[in-house]
Image (cartoon, rainbow, N blue to C red):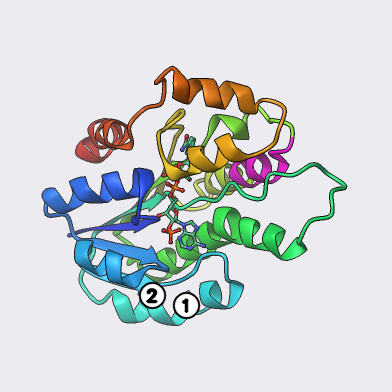
Amino acid sequence: MDLFVITGITKGLGYSINNILKKENKYTLSISRNIEVSQEYNNRVIECDLSNISQIIDLNRKFSEAITDNITRIVFINNAGAIDPIYKVGEDIDYENIVKHINVNYIAPIIITNEIMKIMNKDCRLEIINITTGAAERPLAKWALYSSSKKATKTYFETIKLEDERINVLNYDPGVMDTSMQGYIRKSNFPLVGKFREYSEEKMLKSPDEVAKDIMKRYIQTL
Ligand SMILES: NC(=O)c1ccc[n+]([C@@H]2O[C@H](COP(=O)([O-])OP(=O)(O)OC[C@H]3O[C@@H](n4cnc5c(N)ncnc54)[C@H](OP(=O)(O)O)[C@@H]3O)[C@@H](O)[C@H]2O)c1
């Protein structure tokens, strides 16, 4: 039996992917801080604010309680992500927001993957679909946290793939999508913000539904 573990299903790309999984009757476990929304859509839900380190560490207990079935393949869709804070080095910034950012984009996927590996039996496979970004490869001024945390996560997954042959990793860059993350970017202050405003004005943003269909077609249906 396959299990789909997915983060960030309340809106944006994660919402669209999760909708398709639901329509296709896939067995899903979502990890979300918004338990009401998630319970409507998923077979199982773990409540966790991925920016909160104590809650991330507590996944240790919650994972073993949530997964009891005989799973032969796990697909982990690492989708939840944060772009804020966008700031210039040296600015007076609340350091807690830096820690929260790193927790969501980097620490949480590491610990979730570890928990998944702990419950996998020797014949179970793990497919990690990591939602990455062009900014991980092409840094943008004032996006240092986002570019570096997304790159770090990508490197982490590529490294653990070398450690266990049951792990396969697919990095997927969705391009520029019409989600609340883009809304936040357009309202921010950084040198290339005009370009992002233009993408929206010129209707160049991809819909998250279209991107989710592409992910399903390329990866999930062929896994
Ligand atoms: N939008 C783009 O143009 C774009 C481009 C390249 C890559 N990406 C990547 O695509 C992925 C999805 O982005 P999106 O545009 O769909 O973003 P989005 O609309 O802002 O949605 C982000 C999702 O992550 C969840 N999330 C954020 N912080 C969380 C936290 N502390 N705890 C639990 N869940 C949290 C949100 O849940 P809540 O409702 O609880 O906040 C939401 O479901 C991200 O990894 C992003 O880096 C996006």
Q: Is residue 178 visible?
A: yes
Residue 144 inside the magenta-drawn segment:
yes
Residue 17: x and y, percent? Answer: 28, 45
- Main SS of residues in magenta: helix
Q: Which residue is mark 1?
A: 60
The answer to which image quadrant residue 185 occupies is top right
Query: Relative to residue 133, is residue 138 depicted above or below?
Result: above
Q: Please tell me which residue is depicted at 79% across the width and 56% down the height of the picture.
A: 93
Q: Residue furthest top?
A: 202
Instruction: Identify residue for label 2.
Output: 63
Q: Secondary structure at mark 2?
A: helix
| Residue 203 image offset from top left, x and y in percent | 39, 21
Decide: few, some or many residues near mark 1? Use Cα within 10 Å; few <14, some 14-19, many ≥20.
Answer: some
Please state which of residues 96 and 149 is positioned toward the viewer in this rendering.
96
What x and y, as percent, mark residue 6?
35, 56
* Range of residues picked out in magenta: 142-151
- Please report contact status of discs 1 and 2: CB closer than 8 Å, yes or no: yes
Location of residue 110 with respect to 217 vertically, above or below? below
Q: Write down the quadrant of residue 146 in the picture.
A: top right
In magenta segment, residue 49? no
Beta carbon of the mark 2 residue lies under 8 A of ligand 1: no
Amino acid on which disc 1 is placed: Asn
Identified at 30% across, 35% down, the residue is 215
Q: At x 46% / y 21%, what residue is drawn?
A: 201
**Residue 90 versus residue 49 in the image, above or below:** above
Left or right of 71 in this view: 203: right
Task: Report the number of discs.
Answer: 2
